[in-house]
Image: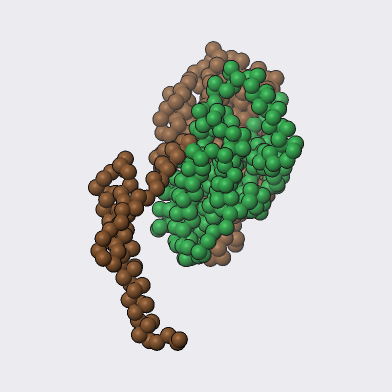
Amino acid sequence: MSHELTLEGIDRSATIAEAQDRLLGSQTRGGLLRRMAALGAGGALAGGVMAALPQVARAATQNDIDILNFALTLEYPAAAFFTEAERNGALSGETAVAARVIGAHERAHVRALRHALGPKAVKRGHYDFGDATEDQQKFHDAGIWFENVAVGYLKGQAPLIDSDAILVVALGLHSVEARHAAWMRRIGGDVPAPSAFDAPITRESAISQFRARGYLAIEPKTTVKKRAPTVTG
Amino acid sequence: MSRRRGDGRRGLVAAGLVALGLIGAAIGVVAALGSSGSTDAPPAAHAATKHGRHHHRKLPPLPEAPAPAFKVGKPIYLKHVGDLSRYAPVLRVVDALAEPRASASSVAPLYTTTSDGTTNIVLVIGHPHTDAHGRVWVKVRFPSLPNGLTGWVPRNALGLMVLVRTHLVIDLEHLRLTLLRNGRPIFSAPVGVGQPQWPTPRGSFYVRDKLTEYASPFYGPIAFGTSARSEVLTDWPDGGFVGIHGTNEPQLIPGRISHGCVRLRNEDILRLARLLPVGTPITIK
């Protein structure tokens, strides 16, 4: 069975590919038309679907929902990475402490974003971090990357957020991720603050970096239909 | 006119006085804010003049910061570390070795798929090991004869790690199956187990896969494949694997009735199927 780590291969998980399509498409004319159509359909469903949405999702523009979902798309693997590292129990010293604390924060971020977005939240994907959760040096490298990409994309998205109230949340996440990045750099032996200015990164850059890391995975096929058992009975 | 050294020094002194004045003004503002509270109008700034008089200049009020659209709750620290297990798919055919080094003897080959056509998964146990060459090894449990073998494989031979919080316990003496989650029982049911000549093997195993929508009333509506193998029916098709499944003879449960499999009444296997994830470790005692 092939476990090729391609973006197309995980379309069933509807994570990065869905978020990417949404975000990239929302800035095209076609995306705008789709959004208008969705608003029309949403109006027709107002009685049921809208009532189930959390207040944040109901009040937010589609642009802001997309930005929050993009943030969630990258918070999922970050939380999974630190969780797996802690569970594996292979880290030691301050690195192990960092995995525990940062993981606790990232899980809280995931929970908050999912609660805010309700049924509009993107789904969690499947991630394969290889031995980056078992090898201390590789953990440092990956941990620094996760936090840097979070800081960069939040910085890039902030000016595009329609709602000041959501911008405040994004800035709150941004500063925490920046602290994580500095901590991971320090315990990895790097200068915590290497430069006087941090440039934002684009959504496309965040996605291409994530793809290059090869962390996306497809769910193992462990259920089969219409095949008689051959166990002893 | 050229600048003389004295002019430069007077300039420095003047600059210092101005700086001291600004610092003093700032201290005054901070002190006033501390005593007046946030709801009062900001205090006037005091600018010292050369005659010692103060001009009161009101600072424009700053807008209140917007409230966040939502808040992030408390950090979520992991609990139940001891109740978690992990499994991973086998990405490429690899030998499980006796020790975490390339030169160790082979225990058994591991393949990428099962005879059911599902992804071959292994249970990851213990802590990983990094060898002198920087290669990470993990210890895994896999189906074997004799039952209970473990071995080491390179981490890169496996795919994503999947965490599992459940544990299935099958009590052969009391003919009872219990499913625990985070160490607590969440489901229990009577079971049929192997007849004396075809005993259900005791030991540590795991759920390998799940089969559904097949037309075989003998196995009931759902069957789980496990890593346990019959130590007697070794020539059974596909290796004599022990399963957990339903039955078309519910009246025989509980009892020692099977060829080694663990049988549940159909209503019980359906309830179990909603709670039991693949990869769950199994203890048969």
Q: Quadrant of the N terminus of chain A?
A: top right
**Which colour is chain A painted?**
green
Name which residue lies at 36% across and 72% down.
B15
Q: Quadrant of the C terminus of chain A?
A: top right
The location of residue B105, given as percent across then percent down, is 59, 57
- Residue B142 visible to an observer of this rendering: no
Which quarter of the figure has residue B13? bottom left
> Viewer-proximal residue, A145 or A151?
A151
Name which residue lies at 59% across and 22% down.
A49
The location of residue A130, given as percent across then percent down, is 59, 52
**Which colour is chain B painted?**
brown
> Viewer-proximal residue, B167 or A130?
A130
Left or right of A27: which side holds A166?
left
The location of residue B243, given as percent across then percent down, is 59, 29
Which quarter of the figure has residue A91? bottom left
Which quarter of the figure has residue B114? top right
Name which residue lies at 27% across and 56% down.
B28
The location of residue B110, given as percent across then percent down, is 64, 47
- Residue B36 visible to an observer of this rendering: yes
Above-or-below relation of B235 to A149: above
